[in-house]
Amino acid sequence: MSSQAIIQGIVGRFHRDRGRLIDILRDVQAALGHIPPEAVSQVAGLLGLSTVDVEGVATYYHFFTPTPAGRYAVYLNDNIVSAFKGRAAVAEAFEKAAGCSFGETTPDGLIGLHSTSCIGMNDQEPAALINGVVFTNLTPVKVRAIVAAMKAGRPVASLVKTYGEGANRSRLVRSMVRNNIRRKGPVLFAPHIAGAALRKALARTPEEVITEVKKANLLGRGGAGFPTGLKWEFCRKEKESPHYLVCNADEGEPGTFKDRVILTERPKLLFEGMAIAGYAIGAREGILYLRAEYAYLRPHLEKSLADLRAARLLGRRIGGRKDFDFDVTIKLGAGAYICGEESALLESAEGARGEPRDRPPFPVQIGYLGKPTSVNNVETLCAGARILEKGADWFKAMGTPRSSGTKVLSVSGDCRLAGVYEIEFGTTVWQLLKMAGGTEAQAVQIGGPSGTCISRGQVNRTIGFEDLATGGSVIVIGPQRDLFDVVHNFMDFFIEESCGHCVPCRAGNAILKRKLEKVTSGKGTAKDLADLEAWGKIIKAASRCGLGQTSPNPILTTLQNFREHYDMRVRKDADFIPEFDLEAAVKPAASVTGQVLTAHEEAAHE
Amino acid sequence: MSNITFTIDGQSCTAETGQTILEAARANGIYIPSLCWYEGMKPAGSCRICTVRVGGRYMAACTQPVSEGMAVENMAPDLEDMRKALVEMLFVEGNHMCPTCEKSGNCELQALAYRYQMLVPRFPYNFPVRRVEPAGTKILLEHNRCVKCLRCVRGVKAKDGRKVFGALHRAGRKKISVDPALASALPDRQAKEAMDRCPVGSILKKEVGFAVPIGQRKYDKTPIGSDIQKAEG
């Protein structure tokens, strides 16, 4: 079949719906291995869009490529924990065996090597996605075997020989990913009987459901901690209709992977939570926005939805009630951290570039397709279901006065037992380090790059909204690590994942990184540290969304908590050292003209 | 009908429901420096130069609606320094060579730099390699100067409502592009409008000269904002 016929078929399957542009481009990328300019023009023509609209989306997301990504497209995670666990050797093995460098595709188009931001496998790094299939705990030996199999033309799925525990082994997942649930708490990982929570919720009015969730003091688990009951109430009260419920399953904060495990082991608890939220806010439609990296879970999630429909817990007349229909559709992303921000997520769910919207208006007022929408985190919706099942008092009895319940943490890095821990709020970092076997840590990154880096002296701080609020990423940094490697990695991440809309985030972070490089290369002075701090504050204050407002945190929180590391790098003997090496720069020209002129001599002439 | 009262730097102002801080400020004769904002277009909130402070929180005046009793800080020294820093970021991010630019004197970025008495930006120059790109038959895109304000994206539409301009890529690679067919079909009037609305010299209409000499252009005579700001006593 010709490319044109393939594209025609794909666009037809999505009924020429512009709102499905990302789905369309995902399928074009999968079918053709890339999205060439001709495909952009054809899709634009079929959808009645301008080419620049389609190209704008096709160039925005990481997993869309304008040139062939390789019949085997390898996406190797490049976050810092991957580096801790031997990424450099794995990357080198890929390059040697495949015969091309990262960022390239082999001349025959067989293998493409790409770096990618955190894929949610920090507890089993180095990890890579190959045509969407997850490969974990990679070593150079394993890589050579994988590349040999690719060269032999074997299907990617056939390279997965061992399976993880639990649902990872099930027929619909068949993945080597491990859950690594290290600590089961009563909210997320206690046994779940489908329907128990939903039946109790439907015995009450939507207002009563909201009251119960408010009484339980459930705060958003994505990290921002907005009161869930209040969000539902705001959404319910909006007069526009219909209302939508959107579940944010786009956890992209480097180091977080707890939603992966919840989606694997508790999908029905989540969907029940979505139905309860839908009932509370008056929505009939729910959308699970799933990050592209977790597309391997989609068949498993679809099966859970089908089971729930069969049990009359989703679909029409839920629980036999004539007035309550609710169902869930899954929408996939295409690789963009910023889509975890709720308004960017909505843009993406509508098929556009995932750039944040201005607020106000908030999504509860004007959200998905311009209608009132509640966007909630995976873990939040699960906790909501448990609150309805077991009561607000049960929930509030756990945690601290300000932070009720439990939190699922993703712990990775330099610790013996990386994995998922469901702990009560109020747990100290030290207690967590003991559980995970990471007590040697020189530093702990709480909340991922956008969070805060704490020192050993601060390990008695507690996880909770009153102290260390976090979406759940905890990265243990051992004494053998150079803290600046971590900071550089995090800044590179923000520079790459900025949507590029606003000036401070787009231009500022690159400037900040360059200044940091000046300091770490030994050319910094006290003035440079003052600049880092002042410029970081400007970026935080002026940026448009949470990404920019937190992007200088890797620098600012280490400046605050590890000042001695910076002080050791700066020169005390000078007020100013140029970033620019004049002697090196004029060397080629000087050698041509035969001049021997050093920077110092030149300065003396002036 | 003015039904909201609020203050800017202590001065009492009035506004209508739904007005943004920036619109209301203008109506009250107060200039809040801005770059991406353009009268009549949906605000983009992209340059952040109009950032003001309300109750300790920073917000873009062009996107934030006024509310009753709001106390807006506009000319605080640290806000002005932040705005200057944002202008400087734009200067180092692209390649802005005022003496050879067609827009010199009419350029809003240049005018802001004068306003803030920018001599050398505090940030190191990036000197990116960017191209000058023919965008259809009517216009050129001078990417060296583009500040991604999205005025062209927001303001220029084809007859059938389709976008002529759009943004590609993300992060520092973000750039403006066109649908070549739609850009070629732009009537001369609209192509000129696109050029005039561009705050910098990034959109150039082909085959036209520049009638007004440097020295007699808009910001050569009066500084940016002086048309809005009431004469101070």
Image (cartoon, rainbow, N blue to C red):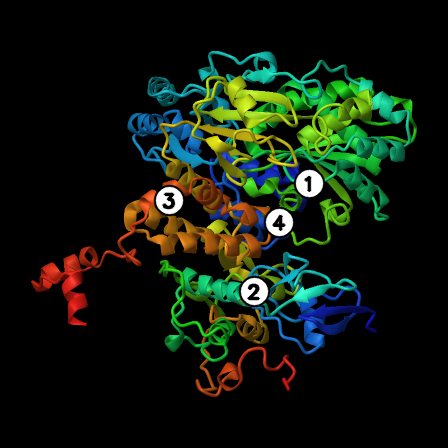
Determine whether, in the image, residue A352 is placed left or right of residue A412. right
Determine whether, in the image, residue A279 is placed left or right of residue B128. right
Query: In the image, residue B192 lies at what x, y percent?
Result: 55, 75
Q: Which residue is mark 4?
A: A356
Q: Quadrant of residue A99?
A: top left
Q: Which residue is mark 1?
A: A15
Specify the farthest residue to the left: A594
What amino acid is labelled 3 in the image? Answer: Tyr
Q: Which residue is mark 3?
A: A566
What amino acid is labelled 2 in the image? Answer: Leu
Q: Residue at x 85, y 34 (%)?
A: A211
Chain containing the residue with disc 1: A
Q: Is residue B13 visible?
A: yes
What amino acid is labelled 1 in the image? Answer: His
Q: 10 Å neighbourhood of mark 1: few (<14), some, or many (≥20)?
A: few
Query: In the image, residue A182 lies at what x, y percent?
Result: 57, 16
Disc 1/disc 2 C-alpha distance (Å): 50 Å
Q: 10 Å neighbourhood of mark 3: few (<14), some, or many (≥20)?
A: some
Disc 3/disc 1 C-alpha distance (Å): 57 Å
Q: Which residue is mark 2?
A: B79
Same-subunit check for callouts 4 and 2: no
In this view, the mark in front (3 or 1): 3
